[in-house]
Image (cartoon, rainbow, N blue to C red):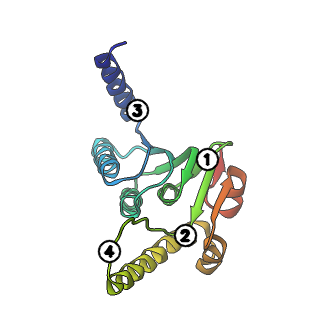
């Protein structure tokens, strides 16, 4: 199959998924993928008020992109449209936050979920101390937003979650994620 054939196959698969009201969230959660997610979600909402399934296989990504996706799902749910999230394989970092927005949150038996303290990667920065203080303040505010989301959906105290995830990466099996409250059901 040539390049054109692969493009046509990919387009057909995307169209079949949309007909089934399924959105696949793959790869890094960046601003481009989030934008595509918003447009796809908007399209499905405009078509009908039937339930929507969001399949997630992602190593995470940019906080603002993930928060936008979380907010978009919550907004659709406020309109009375059911949106369920399905973790398949892996949901790490911001992908776990996006998954929390599902009315029903599922994970496959072999899935792994990663939750960790917010981090910022910057290389070769020449920031002044005042700029570093400002960035730290914003990181702390964003961390609080993430902790509030996890607390809301897991029914655990924010402080308990913070104590558990700060200073380390925490990997959950599907069973552990269910016990902790990150998912509702293993499929």
Secondary element type, mark 1 = strand
Residue plotted at (49% across, 70% down): 146
Depth check, mark 2 against mark 4: the one in front is 4
Determine the residue positioned at 42% across, 49% down. 28
45 to the left or right of 176: left
Mark 4 element type = loop
Disc 4 to disc 3, C-alpha distance: 46 Å
- Label 4 or label 3, whichever lies nearer to me, is 4
Estimate the spatial distance between the alpha carbons at disc 1 and disc 2, rounded to whole Å. 22 Å
Dot 3 or dot 1, earlier in sequence? 3
**Residue at label 4?**
126
Task: Nearest to the eye among marks 4 and 1: give it.
Answer: 4
| In the depicted structure, whether residue 178 falls above or below residue 20 | below
Horizontal relation, residue 104 to residue 50: left or right: right
For disc 1, the marked residue is 107
Work out how far the residue at label 4 is from the one at label 1, CA to CA, in angstroms.
42 Å
Image quadrant where residue 74 sits: bottom left
Residue that carries the numbered disc 3 in the rendered image: 17
Q: CA distance from mark 3 to mark 1?
A: 19 Å
Q: Residue 141, image x and y in percent?
A: 42, 79
Residue lying at the far top of the rendered structure = 1
Q: Nearer the viewer, mark 2 or mark 3?
A: 2
Dot 4 or dot 1, earlier in sequence: 1
Gap between marks 2 and 3, in whole Å? 34 Å
Residue hosting label 2: 117
Q: Position of residue 12 (x, y in %)?
A: 34, 24
Image coordinates of residue 84 in percent, x first then y, are 50, 49
Classify the position of the C terminus by image quarter. Answer: top right
Foreground tag (1 vs 2): 2
Q: Nearer the viewer, residue 117 or 89?
A: 117
Q: Are marks 1 and 2 in contact (CB under 8 Å)?
A: no
In the structure shown, which secondary structural element does the residue marked by tag 3 occupy? helix
């Amino acid at each position: 199959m040539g390049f054109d054939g692969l493009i046509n196959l990919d387009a057909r698969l995307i169209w079949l998924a949309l007909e089934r009201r399924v959105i696949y969230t793959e790869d890094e959660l960046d601003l481009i993928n989030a934008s595509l997610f918003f447009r796809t979600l908007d399209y499905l909402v405009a078509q009908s008020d039937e339930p929507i399934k969001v399949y997630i296989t992602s190593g995470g990504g940019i906080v603002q992109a993930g928060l936008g996706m979380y907010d978009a799902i919550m907004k659709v749910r406020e309109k009375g449209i059911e949106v369920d999230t399905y973790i398949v394989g892996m949901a790490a970092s911001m992908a776990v936050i996006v998954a929390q927005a599902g009315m029903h949150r599922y994970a496959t038996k072999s899935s792994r979920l990663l939750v960790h303290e917010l981090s910022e990667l910057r290389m070769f920065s020449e920031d002044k101390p005042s700029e570093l203080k400002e960035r730290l303040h914003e990181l702390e505010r964003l961390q609080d937003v993430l902790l509030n989301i996890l607390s809301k959906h897991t029914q655990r105290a924010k402080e308990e979650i913070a104590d558990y995830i700060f200073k380390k990466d925490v990997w959950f099996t599907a069973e552990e994620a269910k016990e902790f409250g990150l998912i509702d059901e293993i499929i």
